[in-house]
Amino acid sequence: MNENVQTIGLPAKTGGWLHYLANPGRFLRTIRPILPWAGSASFILTVVGIVWGYQFAPADWEQGDAARIMYVHVPAAWVAMAGYAALALCSLFSIVWRHPLADIAAEEIGPVGAGFTFVCLVSGALWGKPMWGAYWVWDARLTSVLILFFLYLGHIALIRAFDNKAHGYRAAAILALAGAVNLPIIVYSVQWWNTLHQGNTISISGGAKIYVTMLYPLLICTLGFYLGFLTMVCARIAAAICERKTASLLLAAVERG
Amino acid sequence: MMNNWPFINGAYGVTVIFLIAAAGLTLARYRRAMARLKQAEEL
């Protein structure tokens, strides 16, 4: 068995698939050939979606050209929330099963997710000025997304705040799990409270309320952003594994003299 | 009527700059990590 596999606290009968995924070496071998293809696909989809939304999609009958901001704002918001859900899931795996890759994944998701949340907040503010007359209002949706951004920043800081890495992973995982309660608040904030932010334009149960000429570039951009997020996180995890492997090899070389 | 295009350009600009910077930094880190691992394995 590969020396990278950590099996502490994981019954063999129930966690076979976790054992399989918990091997950093196997992850590296699997992900390396996929990364260039995933990166290229995300680049093409994102460029097509952005150019389509910026240049060719029709202006909204009510909001005019300002509605074009939706093509970057909405995908960034979805990825920011999905990223945090992934972070919480990794934290659960880390706390319950001591999954070694989950700790690395949580560490690497944080900065990328925070970046997408920042894009969501800035693009939203730039939409708010012409539409609402203000860059920012303390609306339930905006405030809950701002809290999401702070949760990301808190997680990034906490995971690096301890000399003992394992302590940082545990503390950050608890924060991530507690902060997951913010996700349904973000999603349902426009229903639970009277918000200035508009309601959901697209939902799984209710379908889409926009015409296909606007829906297609939005979905393409969303797919590009999701794939881009996934590619960046996987590349960062692969880099982190390589960095740890390099450090242990150098240490072994020093000990050998 | 208010000219919306500076706000639209700003939103797209921030997004594109973020995506290019994040992808560039990730790619640089990935390549550096791979190169260092290769060097360490040759030791």
Image (cartoon, coloured by chain):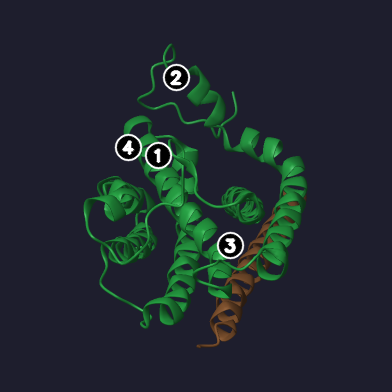
Chain colours: A green, B brown
- Name the residue nearer the viewer: A93 or A138: A138
Q: Chain of mark 2?
A: A
Q: Nearer the viewer, mark 3 or mark 2?
A: 3
**Does the rendering let one see residue A245?**
no
Dot 2 amino acid type: Gly
- In the structure shown, which secondary structural element does the residue marked by tag 2 occupy? loop
Q: Quadrant of residue A75?
A: bottom right
Q: Nearer the viewer, mark 1 or mark 4?
A: 1
Quadrant for the N terminus of chain A in the image = top right
Q: Earlier in the sequence, mark 2 or mark 4?
A: 2
Quadrant for the C terminus of chain A in the image = bottom right
Q: Which mark is residue A89?
A: 1
- In the structure shown, which secondary structural element does the residue marked by tag 1 occupy? helix
Left or right, B8 with reference to A185: right
Q: Nearer the viewer, mark 3 or mark 1?
A: 3
- Mark 3 lies on residue: A71
Q: Earlier in the sequence, mark 3 or mark 2?
A: 2
Dot 1 amino acid type: Leu
Q: At 55% from the left edge and 73% from the top edge, which residue is drawn?
A: A64
Q: Are the residues flagged by discs 2 and 4 from a single subunit? A: yes
Q: Which mark is residue A95?
A: 4
Left or right, B35 with reference to A176: right
